[in-house]
Each structure stands twice: as C-alpha cells, then as structure tokens.
C-alpha cells in the first residue's frame, strides 16, 4: 500500500486533522483542533470530512490512519498519513488536550 506520509512535526498548524482512533483513545488525549471519526465509522460519516481540503489522518502509531488515508485517496479525496501517529505527535511536543480533565496522554 503506497500511502503519502508526513512527519508529525511537519503537519501545518491550520491543517484539517482527522483522528481515527477509538473513543477511549480520543478521550485520553488528542490534538486540540482535530476532528474525531473512529476508523469503523469513517465510511458512513465521510461526508463530514471536507472534500476540498487536504486531510491529515492520525491514529495511535500510524496503521489505522494509513488504512483511512488509502481509502480516502481511493475515493478521490486528498489525504496524508501522519507517520508515527499520536505517539510521534506527542514526542514532537505538539499541542494536546483531553476530554477527561486530566493531563492528556496517548492511550
């Protein structure tokens, strides 16, 4: 599978970031501006993803987001996988927030 990929520290600040992790992972910690659509819901919710924007797709380590990126590109969208996922995002010192009220972390 040939999937375009970008380093977490190279994702533009104003990018449309799509987080395809599960609800508990999102709850623990995510990029503040990300949109959350779990991978299992993406096909039926794809109309929520802007067709005119490049979509940067992230998961925990990069596997699920690579699947989502490949599928989005297959249906004619422009998508890029965030290599290393949220683990790389956190390691790069990128902003994170959580829904738990606790310090955000990558679950």
Image: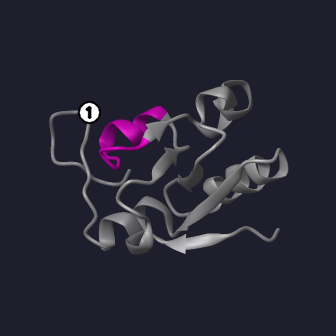
Label 1: few (<14), some (14–19) or many (≥20) C-alpha neighbours in 10 Å: few
Q: Nearer the viewer, residue 95 or 52?
A: 52
Residue 48, position as x, y percentages in the image: 59, 28
Name which residue lies at 47% across and 49% down: 17
Name which residue lies at 73% across and 67% down: 3
Query: How does the figure colour the protein chain or chains?
Result: one colour
Residue 12 occupies which quadrant of the picture?
bottom left
Name which residue lies at 44% across and 66% down: 11
Residue carrying label 1:
99
Is 78 drawn above or below residue 93 in the view shown?
above
Residue 64, position as x, y percentages in the image: 64, 53
* Horizontal arrangement in the rendering, residue 5 relative to residue 92 (left or right): right
Outermost residue, front direction?
Answer: 52
Residue 47, position as x, y percentages in the image: 67, 27
* Horizontal arrangement in the rendering, residue 88 relative to residue 48 (left or right): left
On-image quarter of the N terminus: bottom right
Q: Which residues are magenta?
A: 23-34
Residue 79, position as x, y percentages in the image: 66, 56
Name which residue lies at 50% across and 45% down: 19
* Horizontal arrangement in the rendering, residue 94 relative to residue 101 (left or right): right
Q: How many marks?
A: 1
Is 5 drawn above or below residue 15 in the view shown?
below
Residue 67 occupies which quadrant of the picture?
bottom right
Q: Nearer the viewer, residue 48 or 22?
A: 48
Is 28 drawn above or below residue 107 in the view shown?
above
* Residue 48 part of the magenta segment: no
Q: Nearer the viewer, residue 16 or 43?
A: 16
* Residue 27 part of the magenta segment: yes
The secondary structure type at the circle numbered 1 is loop
């Amino acid at each position: 599978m040939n999937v375009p990929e970008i380093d977490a520290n190279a994702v533009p600040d104003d990018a449309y970031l799509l987080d395809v992790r599960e609800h508990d992972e999102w709850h623990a910690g995510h990029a503040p501006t990300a949109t959350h659509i779990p991978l299992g819901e993406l096909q039926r919710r794809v109309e929520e993803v802007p067709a005119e924007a490049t979509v940067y797709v992230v998961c925990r380590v990069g596997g699920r987001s690579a699947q989502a990126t490949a599928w989005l590109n297959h249906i004619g969208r422009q998508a890029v996988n965030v290599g290393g996922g949220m683990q790389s995002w956190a390691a790069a010192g990128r902003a994170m927030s959580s829904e738990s009220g606790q310090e955000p972390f990558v679950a």
